[in-house]
Amino acid sequence: MAKKRTKFGQLTHRDLRAFDQRSTDLVLAAMDAGCTGRVSSNGHAILHNSAGQTTSVPPNSVSLNRSAQNAAADLKRFLEGHTTQPEAAPAPANPTSPITVVEALDRYGMTFSNWMDTNGELSPKDKIEVVPAPDGSPLFSLLPESAPTPVETPAEETEEVVYPVTAVAEANSVTGKTVRNRLRAAGGRDKDGRYRATPSKLLRAGLDVPSPAEPNQTERTDDQQALSPDVDAAEILDRIRSLLGEDPRVQVLKAEKEALSDEAIRQERRAVAAEERCAETEKELGETKARLALVKEAFEA
């Protein structure tokens, strides 16, 4: 006869030789489900599940004892308690372990994508730290070692001084038209038509750079100098003409003006000649009237 098991463990057919077939099947089903058991001193199989519950199976399932008749129902409830016992959850991964941007997108989806929209551009290799919030939602932060380094922008070049065309013309004893022509040939004219008489452009054009007489005097444009209150109207007109250059329409207007002036002189001379002829005619008329009076007196005498 087999020795009875006094400690909980896996029961086998060898331990259940005193049990009938139905009781043996019940005990072995519990063993297959992961329960443990032992045979008590009175010959019953004491079963233990993962929930800490115990039940007993009598060796004779056809006994008139009510507990023997309810053994199958008790074992069913016993196994349900064993199978529904929650398994120990695996240890969560370290929430603060850094992950890449690609891993964060794959793991957190739109939550991480929305966070990216508010934190600028990130490279796929940037490291992201994820920690749980009090409500369980993930909180993202960019690790300092992967933070993008600011791009150094080159320092802006100092803008060159732009001299007025008139000042350049005076310094070089040439006309403003000559200065503009040389600047145009040296690339000193902008797309908007303005001339940039900078030192580099003047040297390229073969012109001397004017010496600044007063502070900020060289930075004044031709238009500003033309509008200065200490410049008379004639000088303003000359500067405007020098800026505009020779306009063929002006020559046409001058020619028309001269022609009209000549015509006015001719008309005036004609008017003077007509007045002289009128005076002579009046004189002749007076003499004729005097002769007629003498003739009339002679006839009456």
Image: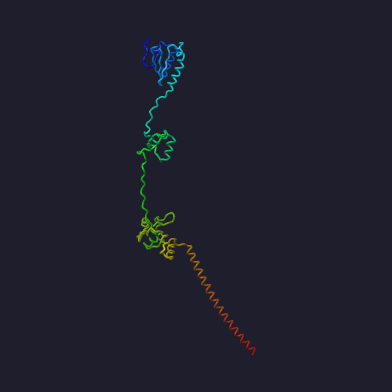
Examine the image and state in which quarter residue 274 appears.
Answer: bottom right
Most foreground residue, 165 or 124: 124
The location of residue 129, given as percent across then percent down, is: 38, 35
Q: Nearer the viewer, residue 67 or 284?
A: 67
* Residue 71 in which image quadrant: top left
Please determine whether, in this image, residue 70 is positioned above or below residue 161.
above
Q: Residue furthest bottom?
A: 301
Quarter the N terminus occupies: top left
Residue, far top: 1
- Quarter residue 161 falls in: bottom left
Query: Of all residues shown, which one is farthest toward the front?
Result: 66
Of residues 162 and 285, the one nearer the viewer is: 162
Using the image, determine if residue 155 lies above or below residue 91. below
Q: How is the image coloured?
A: rainbow
Q: Looking at the picture, does residue 232 appear above or below residue 65?
A: below
In the rendered view of the protein, which quadrant contains the C terminus?
bottom right
* Percent of width and height locating residue 100: 38, 35
Indicate the position of residue 251 as horizontal and vertical percent values: 47, 64
How many numbered discs, if any? Answer: 0
